[in-house]
Image (cartoon, rainbow, N blue to C red):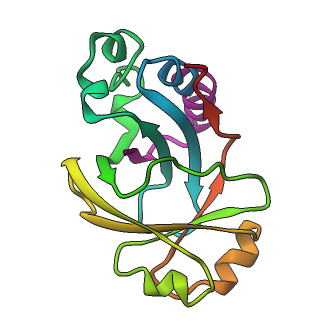
Amino acid sequence: MIYTVECSFADPARESEWNDFYSNDKLPALISVSGFLTSQRLKALIVGQPTYLAIHTITDPNVLSSVEYRKKGGGNFAKWQSAIMDWHRNIYDGMDLVPAISDGQCLLGSTRSGAELTSLGLRPFNLEAIAMDHLPAKRWFAVIDEPGTRALALVPHGVSVYIVLGKQLKSLQ
């Protein structure tokens, strides 16, 4: 199952500190939770959607209600809460393991159809929300071997382009 967390951050003066916290503290804590298999953060290049996307592979939805998850900071952004906007969490079915996205690659996303991604010669993953916000209810993701600015020039209008903010973390479980 895929667990996504999306948000924007509304305090430019603290955004660098927020990114440092999320990438260096939050993700390592989450990947140490039993049931988290992979975790990676990305940033949207297109305005008008949540800026940040954290995408995780989890074993099942119950991981997010576990004591271990809560103890290790799951869902806890107290220091940052006033600046977090457009926050959405979803659990999707349709993909067993999120592929690692490397520098020089982008994650493309569509909420309308997979055809937009297949038209680029890609094989998108079809995801359907099964828990949490259901926003969006359906998504298609594909990895493209292009850097961000080149990917932006290639994609049709309405397709999201995400660049990596760090390598994918993998569980040692």
> Residue 21: x, y in percent?
57, 25
Quarter the N terminus occupies: top left
Q: Residue at x 35, y 9 (%)?
A: 71
Q: Nearer the viewer, residue 160 or 7?
A: 160
Task: Give residue 81's position: percent from left, percent from top.
Answer: 34, 30
Q: Quadrant of the C terminus?
A: top right
Q: Position of residue 155 (x, y in %)?
A: 59, 83
The residue depicted at 45 percent of the width and 49 percent of the height is 96
Magenta residues, as a range? 1-26
In the rendered image, residue 88 lying in the magenta stretch gets the answer no
> Residue 123's image quarter?
bottom right
Tell me if residue 12 is in the magenta stretch.
yes
Residue at (74, 52) in percent of width and height: 102
Numbered circles on residues, count: 0
Q: Is 39 situated above or below 152?
A: above
Above or below, 141 against 76 in this view is: below
111 or 35: nearer the viewer: 35
What residue is rendered at 36% in x and 73% in y?
A: 111
Residue 35, given in percent of the width and then of the height, sits at 41, 25
